[in-house]
């Protein structure tokens, strides 16, 4: 009997040796728990195979003659709002995943054998090897069959039970631990020696099942655009602290730059860091990448877009129109699977390459989903259009109360779609009035140099709301930051300084007159000066009273709204031409009237303790 036992052990070890020989220089690696093993955990038996297998007296009739006692734990399995499968089941005892979890769930000590009792294994788990029973943060396995098809899966996965890589196999039509892991071969992927069945650099293991290029009628492939995305093509070197994958560069880490197959910090969608924390590893400066990308998170430390908080969390499955959920995270405005490098700045209104693949809202009705968004403003309208629950936050600065306004003053759609007057964001420039002050090109952040690539026929939201050090409008010698409304030192996420005139009470003394007049990039009119020649304005080439108002210290906001005329005035006397509107916190009625007559280019109101009365040719002051 003893000689038969020795013979069987020899056969098992020979088989393992032959398997090992198929991969040059490979060994069973950390699954060798024998006393002289290279790993941190060691037992008392010298035969490496015996810790998992027994030639006789294994667990019942399990095919691999299993020797480790099986776990009877109940697991919390993966789930998310975008998960299309019918769910995961607890692994069937004796099947592949159950065998792996008999050690890796940590409920039974490794070396607790069926045939030989306690094999005296001692030592520390390798980081990440102890999965526990909370498997929400691990890639789903032991799914409820049949599998559910989806556009981001390879076509053969559900229809034929096959991946597009012969080394990555379903087990009885299901995803199990051994679909991705070969327990006998640790170093097939030498950069990621976790018993993977293939070298998984450039996302090969993930792409065996997930197809970014597949389409299905009526469904969205969330991976679409991957092949040309910056996260697939960037060759920045990675230091992986915090971890962003084991392969040494962004393109080679691919999927693993953002996702962890096990023990993910952000369990839904297996993110290395939940929501924006997943992006901070690479986009906050520091030494994790070489070359270092521009520091986006430094912008948020200024006056920044509102991050998710405990009361308004982001979820990938949330509707495109964000109702009652005020937040912003990176993936609200960027699609990490499709975002591309911004090599050139194209003219308005299209989305920038960095926003490729984002979802948006149609500007015509404010509710129809546009996926992917074609125009940049469509993405902004997820929150700044018909979305319910909007509110003015004091951290963004003074909020005027316009005389002519729609029912929802924070809904910019009627403002930009105004047939009377609006800045050309959702439409091209259509004013029938002469615009003597309008420049041919916008000015750079120095307030002097023309940006030769940007015309003024149509503008972007980010032409006004942008980082104050963005690289699109920077000039040589300036500090350069990322583009977009991440954060700014100016209120309302303005790219440049823009001041609102304020009064002690409506119609009374203006408390913040800006004197002496400063028309430079440092002055209170800097944002308007990006597109309008302020010297033309003070020469009264557009309106005969401009110089007097500016020389008295008033700002543009005293008479003009920024977006457009969003509705009728309280008494119907605001025509809306030339963006003329009045802040009810600044002006008061004159004999019960606040009005603007574009025919005579004059107004009736009380401002700065002076009543104005409409009259031919000017805004008369009495």
Image: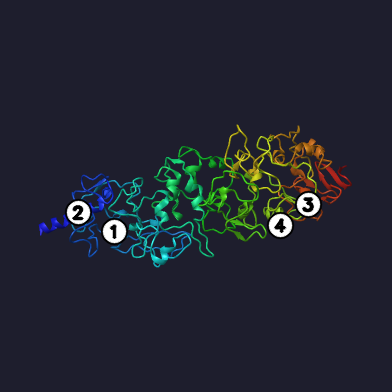
**Comes first in the chain, label 4 or label 2:** 2
Question: Helix, strand, or loop for circle 1?
Answer: helix
State whether residue 303 is above or below residue 419. Answer: above
Disc 1 from disc 4: Cα separation: 63 Å
Q: x, y percentage for residue 329?
A: 54, 49
Q: At x 52% / y 60%, what residue is drawn?
A: 220
| Labels 1 & 3 near each other (Cβ < 8 A) | no
Q: At x 76% / y 53%, what residue is drawn?
A: 404
| Labels 2 & 1 near each other (Cβ < 8 A) | no
Position of 71 with respect to 567 (left or right) is: left
State whether residue 81 is above or below residue 458. Answer: below
**Comes first in the chain, label 2 or label 1:** 2
**Comes first in the chain, label 2 or label 3:** 2
* Quarter that holds the C terminus: top right
Disc 2 from disc 1: Cα separation: 22 Å
Question: Helix, strand, or loop for circle 2?
Answer: helix
- Mark 1 surroundings within 10 Å by alpha-carbon count, few (fewer than 14), some (14 through 19), many (20 or more): many
Disc 4 from disc 2: Cα separation: 80 Å
| Labels 3 & 4 near each other (Cβ < 8 A) | no
Q: x, y percentage for residue 224?
A: 51, 56
Disc 2 from disc 3: Cα separation: 88 Å
Q: Which residue is mark 4?
A: 407
Q: Residue at the bottom extreme?
A: 146
Q: Which residue is mark 1?
A: 99
Disc 3 from disc 4: Cα separation: 16 Å
The answer to whether residue 190 of the structure is visible from this angle is yes
Q: Which residue is mark 2?
A: 14
Q: x, y percentage for residue 334?
A: 55, 50
Q: Nearer the viewer, mark 4 or mark 2?
A: 2
Residue 576 - label: 3
- Mark 3 surroundings within 10 Å by alpha-carbon count, few (fewer than 14), some (14 through 19), many (20 or more): many
């Amino acid at each position: 009997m003893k000689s038969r036992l020795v013979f069987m052990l020899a056969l098992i070890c020979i088989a393992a040796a032959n398997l090992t020989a198929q991969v040059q220089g490979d060994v069973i690696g950390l699954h060798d728990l024998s006393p002289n093993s290279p790993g941190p955990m060691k037992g008392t038996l010298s035969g490496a195979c015996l810790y998992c297998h027994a030639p006789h007296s294994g667990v019942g009739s399990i095919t691999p003659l299993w020797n480790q006692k099986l776990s009877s734990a109940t697991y919390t399995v993966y789930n998310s709002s975008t998960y299309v499968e019918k769910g995961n089941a607890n692994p069937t005892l004796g099947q592949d995943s159950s065998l792996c979890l008999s050690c890796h769930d940590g409920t039974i000590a490794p070396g607790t054998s069926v045939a030989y009792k306690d094999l005296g294994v001692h030592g520390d788990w390798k980081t990440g090897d102890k999965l526990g029973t909370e498997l929400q943060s691990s890639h789903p396995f032991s799914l409820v069959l049949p599998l559910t098809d989806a556009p981001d899966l390879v076509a053969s996965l559900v229809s034929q039970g096959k991946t597009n890589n012969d080394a990555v196999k379903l087990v009885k039509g299901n995803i199990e631990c051994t679909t991705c892991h070969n327990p006998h071969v640790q170093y097939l992927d030498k950069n990621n020696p976790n018993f993977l069945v293939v070298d998984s650099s450039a996302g090969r293991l993930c792409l065996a099942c997930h197809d970014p290029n597949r389409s299905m009628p009526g469904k969205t492939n969330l991976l679409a655009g991957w092949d040309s995305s910056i996260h697939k093509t960037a060759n920045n070197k990675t230091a992986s602290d915090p971890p962003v994958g084991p392969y040494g560069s962004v393109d080679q880490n691919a999927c693993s730059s953002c996702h962890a197959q096990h023990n993910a910090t952000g369990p839904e969608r297996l993110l290395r860091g939940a929501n924006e924390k997943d992006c901070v590893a690479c986009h906050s400066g520091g030494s994790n990448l070489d070359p270092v990308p521009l520091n986006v998170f430094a912008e948020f430390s200024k006056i920044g877009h509102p991050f998710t908080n405990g009361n308004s969390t982001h979820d990938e499955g949330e509707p495109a129109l964000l109702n009652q959920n005020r937040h912003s995270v990176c993936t609200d405005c960027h699609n990490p699977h499709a975002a591309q490098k911004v090599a050139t700045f194209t003219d308005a209104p299209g989305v920038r390459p960095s926003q490729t693949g984002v979802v948006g809202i149609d500007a015509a009705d404010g509710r129809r989903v546009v996926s992917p968004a074609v125009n940049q403003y469509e993405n902004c309208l997820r929150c700044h259009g018909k979305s319910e629950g909007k509110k003015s936050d004091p951290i963004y600065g003074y909020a005027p109360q316009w005389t002519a306004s729609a029912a929802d003053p924070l809904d910019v759609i009627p403002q930009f779609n105004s047939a009377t007057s609006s800045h050309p964001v959702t439409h091209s420039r259509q004013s029938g009035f002469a615009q003597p002050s309008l420049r041919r090109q916008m000015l750079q952040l120095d307030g002097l140099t023309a940006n030769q690539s940007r015309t003024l026929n149509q503008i972007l939201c980010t032409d006004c709301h942008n980082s104050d050090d963005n690289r699109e409008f920077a000039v040589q010698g300036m500090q350069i930051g990322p583009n977009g409304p991440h954060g700014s030192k100016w209120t309302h996420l303005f790219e440049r300084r823009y001041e609102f005139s304020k009064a002690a009470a409506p119609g009374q003394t203006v408390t913040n007159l800006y004197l002496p007049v400063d028309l430079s990039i440092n002055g209170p009119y800097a944002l308007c000066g990006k597109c309008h020649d302020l010297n033309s304005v003070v020469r009264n080439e557009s309106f005969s009273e401009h110089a007097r108002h500016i020389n008295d210290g008033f700002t543009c906001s005293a008479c003009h709204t920024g977006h457009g005329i969003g509705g009728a005035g309280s008494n119907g006397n605001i025509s809306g031409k030339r963006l003329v509107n009045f802040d009810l916190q600044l002006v008061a009625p004159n004999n019960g009237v606040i009005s603007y007559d574009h025919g005579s280019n004059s107004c009736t109101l009380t401002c700065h303790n002076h009543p104005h009365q409409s009259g031919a040719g000017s805004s008369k002051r009495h």
